[in-house]
Image: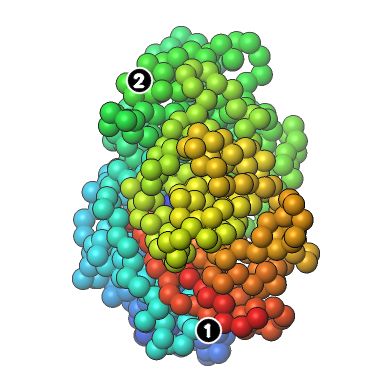
Amino acid sequence: MGAYRLGALHALRAPLLAVSARHTRRYMTRRMPGTAALATAASSAAGQSEVPKSGDVLTLECTSLAFGGRGVCKLPGGFVVFCDRAVPGETLEARVTSLKGGGRFAEATKVSSISPCEHRTAAPCPHFERCGGCTWQDIAYAHQLTMKRDQVVDVMTRVAKVDQTRVQTIVGDCIPSDKTERYRNKMEFAFGPGANGRGVVIGLRPSGNHSDLVEIGNPDGCLLQHPVADEVLRGCRAHLDSDGKSFLLDAFNRRTGEGVLRSLTVRVAVDENGEAIAAVDIAAATRGDDEDAALRGLAEAIARVRGVASVVRTKIPPKPELRLAEGRRQGWVKGGRGGRGGSGGKESRRGGRFRKSGAGEADGEGWSGEDVEVLSGAATLPMKLRGVTFALSAPSFFQTNTDQAEKLVAAVEDACGFSGDGTEVVLDLFCGVGTLGLCVAKKAKHVFGWEVVPEAVKDAERNAEANGITNATFRRGDLAKLKVSLPGVGGKGSGDIPKPDIVIADPARAGMDESLVKVLRSVGAERIVYVSCNPATQARDLLRLKGGDGGEGSRYDVRYCTPVDMFPHTPHVETVVVLDRISI
């Protein structure tokens, strides 16, 4: 998970063109472990295997999954090929897109399925093949849950070094989502030029492609989002097609920094009457009064869509965001240079977490709350979770699967193991707007939240006050720059935080900084509840917390791990891991 972090779906690459038969080679593969690290080692050891070339089309049998959902295939001599959208048990044709690891393994994209796996099903979305936001939409949902648990078991065994027998006991079944369609409360879409460069279209970018665009909402919407969001897309498109001043609102060009409309984000909540209400965020770069007026006209048109409660504008700088990277399969990558300036290759931040673009979304950039201007309605949207109401501003992160977030927070609350007498002190790290801490505060003596983003800390404080929660305190601090300790934690000063009984940690995909792991071992809380959207980096941190890499301080034991499916039809899985202190 990761509070104040924009969650993101991953997708497939765009459909492939036909490949010349002279490049076609047919290989069949045998079973192998489903991990990138072991696959690389296997390929390295197989020195006699014929190495394919980029552009070759191979006939492959997928035998397992690597973490992240790519199919693992292996040539007769041992050479490993990772293939997007390949599923264990499937025979397929795949085109090699690149060689990696100094030629030790290859990446490929599926061209066609020769013999589908037994769990294959028809994908209901007409955009599935090109958009790819729902990578596993053509796989039966029950089997998706199995594959997600298998990936967690793999990294827990291979990275966290949990015994192969014990891991089957401590990793539970993946908690399913009641909804597999229309479950997202927030989606981000990109603007792009229309056919022949005329007009503007809106849609999603395929994975790894910063220039292509899959048009959404004309006429088919997105099966992931609420129907109100589909209506917003149609209303936006109708205005741009009909308004006399819409020619002023051309699509923002990420390569040159020219243009106005960059992205449109729709977040939907449900009010007390059960009615859907939406907040819309238009990211745009305007350069004068005429463009500002045209943009306000677009905002007014969107505000008239039934269910829209607010429209805000996120101001973006009129600068390039992409640069040409020579020698790369994808020519344009993030980090604009030249033209009128650029970001110099730095990732942007939104809501306190570095965010990379994912398929099934727009361009993946973000800005702080200081860049947001309200054009219509309120500045925030209320979202309720476990009886707590959160006021969300445009850059605020909130779990995008609202119904499943209820199950996730319930799992975290259970994992804390509260005694019931309200005596536990909780340290909530990476707390964001207070999502987890405020939801468990009713069972704790006090919750102390820690977050690097000042806007998030302010939002958390406002959320606590609005809900009448008086036993929660929030502090700002960068958890990646700690040297010896968490300032004030375990101290005896009047402003210090008492030693916590429970630590809740919910970092971004990169996991915890090694310095933070050392600090947590020195603090020595009885229990750590580690929530993660990336089980691989979580497993690395678990090994460190166990003392597997040496070091001083308390050592912890992994008691159990609960996978939670927050994003059906994708390889992504959240995990809630409980660690108990076993030594001081």
Residue 401 placement (x, y as % from top left): 38, 47
Relative depth, front residue between 285 and 127: 285
The residue nearer to you, when weighing 433 against 473, is 473
Mark seen at residue 161: 1
For residue 370, which quarter of the picture? top right
Could one spot residue 81 in this view of the protein?
no
* Location of residue 189 (image quadrant): top left
Q: Amino acid at mark 1?
A: Lys
What numbered label is drawn on residue 278?
Answer: none
| Label 1 CA crowd tier, 10 Å (few <14, some 14–19, many 20+) | some
Q: In this rendering, does residue 301 appear at all? A: yes
Q: Are marks 2 and 1 in contact (CB under 8 Å)?
A: no
Who's the residue at 52% across and 75% down the image?
580
In percent of the image, x 36 and y 51: which residue is there?
A: 406
Instruction: Give neighbour class at mark 2: few <14, some 14-19, many 20+ (Cα, 10 Å).
Output: some
Secondary structure under the numbered disc 2 in the rendered image? loop
Mark 1 or mark 2, which is nearer the start of the sequence?
A: 1
Which residue is under mark 2? 305
Relative to 167, 470 lies left or right: right
Q: Residue 235 location in percent, x, y?
A: 36, 22
Q: x%, y% of residue 355? A: 58, 49
Q: Between residues 84 and 284, which one lies in front from this camera angle?
A: 284
- How many angstroms separate mark 2 from mark 1 (CA)? 53 Å
In the rendered view, tell whether residue 255 sits above or below residue 581.
Answer: above
Q: Is label 1 in a helix, a strand or a loop?
A: loop
User: Residue 517, position in %: x, y?
Assistant: 66, 69
